[in-house]
Amino acid sequence: MWITFFMLRMEEGEDPWSPFEDAEEWDLAQWLVKNLGQTRTDEFLKLPITQNRTKLSFHNNRSFLQRVDELPHGPGWSCKKVTVRGNCEDENGEMLQEEVELWCRDPVECVKELIGNPSFKEDMAYSPAKAYADRAGQDRVIDEMWTADWWCDKQKALPEGATIAPIILSSDKTSLSQFRGDKSAWPVYMSIGNIAKAKRRQASARATVLIGYLPAGKLDCFTPDARSLAGYRLFHHCMALLLEPLIGAGNDGVEMVCADSWVRRVYPILAAYVADFPEQCLVSCCKENRCPKCLVAANERGDALNSAMRDPESTKDILHRRKIGQHPPEFEANGLRAVYKPFWADLPHADIFLAFTPDLLHQLHKGVFKDHLVKWCINIIGEDEMDSRFKAIPNYPGLRHFKKGISSVKQWTGREHKEMQRVFVGLLSGAVPSRVLVLARSILDFSYFAQLQVQTTESLEALQTALTVFHTNKDILKELAVRDHFNIPKLHQLSHYVQSITLFGAADGFNTELPERLHIDFAKDSYRASNKWDYEEQMALWLQRQEAVFLRSAYLDWLSQQPRSKSPAGLTGCHSNPYDFDADSDTDSESEETPNLPAAEPLQATHVLANAPSHPHQSVGTIITARGATEFLPALRSFLLKNLPCNTIVPGLQDRFDLYRQVVIVTPPDLRVSDVPQRRRIRATPEMLPSGQKPGIPARFDMALIADRPRSSNFHTLEGVRVAQVHAIFTLPRQFGTYSRALAYVEWFTPFKPPDPVSRMRQVSRSTRQLRRNAAVIHVDEIVRPCHLIPKMGPTVDLRLRSGNAYEVANDFYFNEFIDGEMFCACVISN
């Protein structure tokens, strides 16, 4: 383990920065490796100012890299040559062949690095456990892999005292060159289920490591009709070479030093495989018109069936019989390809077909939602009407406004898909037939339930119910001539979500977004650092150096957190203020992570204002006209009468108030959707007219949930709250006495009406008293969180309705429970 290695070196009298001279030289070396290529590094080191003033121990790129190469690094890289014999003849009549390279690292050594990393100590588990939300043990809780069924089942099959390291693999071919697509790489990544999924999702934590580059050549030695199958076989052959060390380790176990310094016999077993649909078919040796997990018929994937799962032993037997010249009917019936030696054939305790996990990005966000549901609805209401509805959606902090509609969007990413989902149900209401709206709602329900970070028996039942509702109502699309069939691969994959989550834990721990993000660090950046010729070897060396610098940096960070007696001079830990953020920032983020709060402090909702008011000494007239606070004075008088009964001063037009742009509310995390406190903004800013080159800014008076009575300690329910629009955030001037609590002028909406029977969304309207808006002055700390309303648009959008005026033009609204995961849970899931 690298920590032990470094400590031994220090005990021998070596500086923690060695082979560099001191901390400053190490900091420079770290910056050079991370930010400059070899040519630029050489240019920098040869500058006269660098040579004359810095007095470095290295003077050019060559001597610098020699020192970097002295740093300890992770498991080393090796290259295995694979000769592929094609079916094409050369001019001499001999069969063409091609030599390809497999760059790989020992996966068992990588497991040792991961399970022994002390920085993961607080995020590591070594044995399975079951959790329940109730004392009776009826409501199961599943989040991490060790709380799910797979680990429990495998543990029973191993010797007593064995520790399982559930291997999580992912692979995905990616293009390396931007303008010439002939260069590509095929990285294989690995993590272990012992590490908490929140840590695995952090690319910067390096809890997922690169273990190999598969050959990504074109195999020109084959004819076009044979090239595809040859590629399948080459993939499995190379994966078998890459993962061969896991066979012995999975059968017999390997002693490893773990992050808590205990030595355990660890059995690395392939548990999960994260891949998109084509890659899943490649791994499972099946055709792409079939399901890689089950034996559903090719023309029945759109039906709500419970088909038998594929079986590894049966599949291996069918492939073997095919190889020896027999023609088993199951080969064609199961949609198999003639890959006679799958890489997973000898991996102990592994079931590759169960291992495929939900792919939220490609199956849900991009697949079923964007590529299918959105297109179906556009076919029904028309592209122009769909665009008009997106344009009319009111603003909300962090919500993307499609100001030109969605038809003009050229580059779609997962973020755009998620942004559309946040408003889609309310936007469709009134525009499509009721059964189409029910169908759309079921898909959005499924999407939000599938994304939960903590699943329960109740939420999994709701997930399955949402899919059942879809299948019950899908025939309306045939009746409307929108679809002829539902034989859609990505739609069928949703039927396996409940089983996968029950086996391996919540789906957010296996999303394909992480491998796509890792492509930047482990493929694209390393390729750009090469000279583009024989680039795989250069990429491996570049990554080895990056890893060496990362490990040394991680060691120094770890050392700085030890007692001072163990830390050399210059290494001390530091802690930032947990609320160190700009409360008056104009950032357009709706929900931001805050640093973890000190453990001694209970998590409570905190309301934060800027240190100084953005608009000091504003007149009452300005508040009324610029902020639409028409009932400001009557509301303030009522507030003073209730809260300051001894006050004798009557507020009037002569008074001036300090106003704030926004309040930032830091709330405890809802563990179902997040494990960190959330920071949300509620804005109360008047319109700013264009000035010179600066464009104007529309008014922002956000909607919020206000506590209308004392609330329980549960922050994540709609109990005891009411919707209001915040027009002004202010403090009382001194003439009214000392009053430390900030105030807000709000205009009420009605209490929640019964949900709409079709969309099942709650409804609210403007609240009035004697034909005037029902307004009040409240304490800012009575604001629970921001919320979002969607105006009822009817069959067609009112031409007057715009994003900037929607809250003024419309009177009746849907309460948008899809605005974020916490709101969805508060509205849909019982607590």
Image (tube, rainbow, N blue to C red):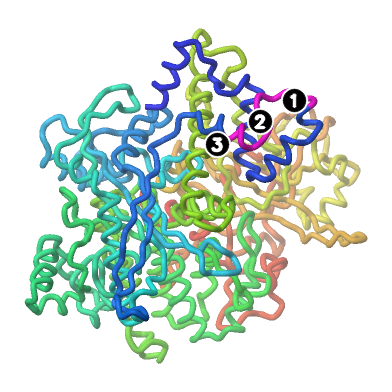
Which residue is denoted by mark 2 in the rendering? 28
Horizontal arrangement in the rendering, residue 311 relative to residue 360 (left or right): left
Category of crowding for the residue at label 2, using alpha-carbon neighbours closer than 10 angstroms: few (below 14), some (14–19), many (at least 20): few
Q: Earlier in the sequence, mark 1 or mark 2?
A: 2
Q: Amino acid at mark 1?
A: Thr
Q: Amino acid at mark 3?
A: Ala
Q: Which mark is residue 230?
A: none
Q: Earlier in the sequence, mark 1 or mark 3?
A: 1
Horizontal arrangement in the rendering, residue 697 relative to residue 72 (left or right): right
Percent coordinates x, y for residue 386 in the rendering: 58, 79
Which circle, 1 or 2, is nearer the viewer?
A: 1
Q: Which mark is residue 54?
A: 1
Mark 2 near mark 3, Cβ–Cβ under 8 Å? no
The outermost residue toward the top is 565
Which residue is denoted by mark 3 in the rendering? 605
The answer to whether residue 17 of the structure is visible from this angle is yes
Q: In what element is the residue under mark 1?
A: loop
Q: Nearer the viewer, residue 417 or 557?
A: 557
Q: Earlier in the sequence, mark 2 or mark 3?
A: 2
Category of crowding for the residue at label 3, using alpha-carbon neighbours closer than 10 angstroms: few (below 14), some (14–19), many (at least 20): many
Residue 60 shown in magenta: yes
Percent coordinates x, y for residue 415 in the rendering: 54, 61
